[in-house]
Amino acid sequence: MTGYGSATDSDVETIVRACSVRSLSERFAAAHRLTPDAVLGRYRRWLLAGEAVVARIGDRPVGLLNLVDDPARPRSTDLALLVADDVQRRGVATGLLDHALGGPVRAGWTVRATVRDDNRAAIGLLRTQRLGPVRLASFEAGELTYEIAIPA
C-alpha cells in the first residue's frame, strides 16, 4: 500500500468497477448477482457512509473500508470492506483494518462485521486480524456476525 485517506465518490466507483459480480454479491450479502452498475445505483450513498477510508497503490484506489457507529450501542461500530479483485489476498484489507482501527481513537471499541457464511476470505480475515479478540456473535440465515473487542 502506498497510502490511505478519506474516500471520494470517484474512489468508490473505481473500486466497485474493479470488482467481479461474485465479489460484489459477497460484500453485500446478496442472494442474487450484483453487477457494478447495480451496486452503484442501489448502494452508492452507503459506500461513503460513516468513516469511509480508501487504500491506494500509487494513485489507484484499491480498497474501501466503512465504519458506521451504532448510536444505540456506545463505542460500537459496524465494519464493511471491499477490495478490488486483482489485489485481493495481498494485505489490502488487513492494512485498512490496521490503519482505521489500530490507533488510540478506537481503543475500547467493539467492531461488528456481518459476512455470508460462504465468504471464506472475509471469515479468515476476521478470525486472524490482530486488533483484538474476536468472537462469533450470531449466525442467522446464512450470515455470520463477528465482534472484535479492541483493547482499551
Image (tube, rainbow, N blue to C red):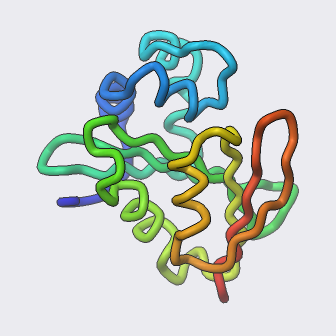
Quadrant (top left/top right/bottom left/bottom right) for the N terminus:
bottom left
In this rendering, the answer to whether 1 lies above or below 22 is below
Q: 77 or 112, which is in the foreground?
A: 112
- Left or right: 122 in relation to 135: left
Q: Is residue 90 left or right of residue 145?
A: left
Q: Is residue 98 above or below residue 28?
A: below
The residue nearer to you, when weighing 19 against 3, is: 19
Q: Is residue 95 left or right of residue 72?
A: left
Q: Nearer the viewer, residue 85 or 52?
A: 85
Q: How many marks?
A: 0
Q: Residue at x 36, y 37 (%)?
A: 8
The residue under the point 87% across, 56% down is 72
Rendered residue at 53%/83% (across/down): 104
Q: Position of residue 3 (x, y in %)?
A: 23, 60
In the rendered view, would you say 4 is above or below 84? below
Q: Residue at x 49, y 24 (%)?
A: 22
Q: Quadrant of the C terminus?
A: bottom right
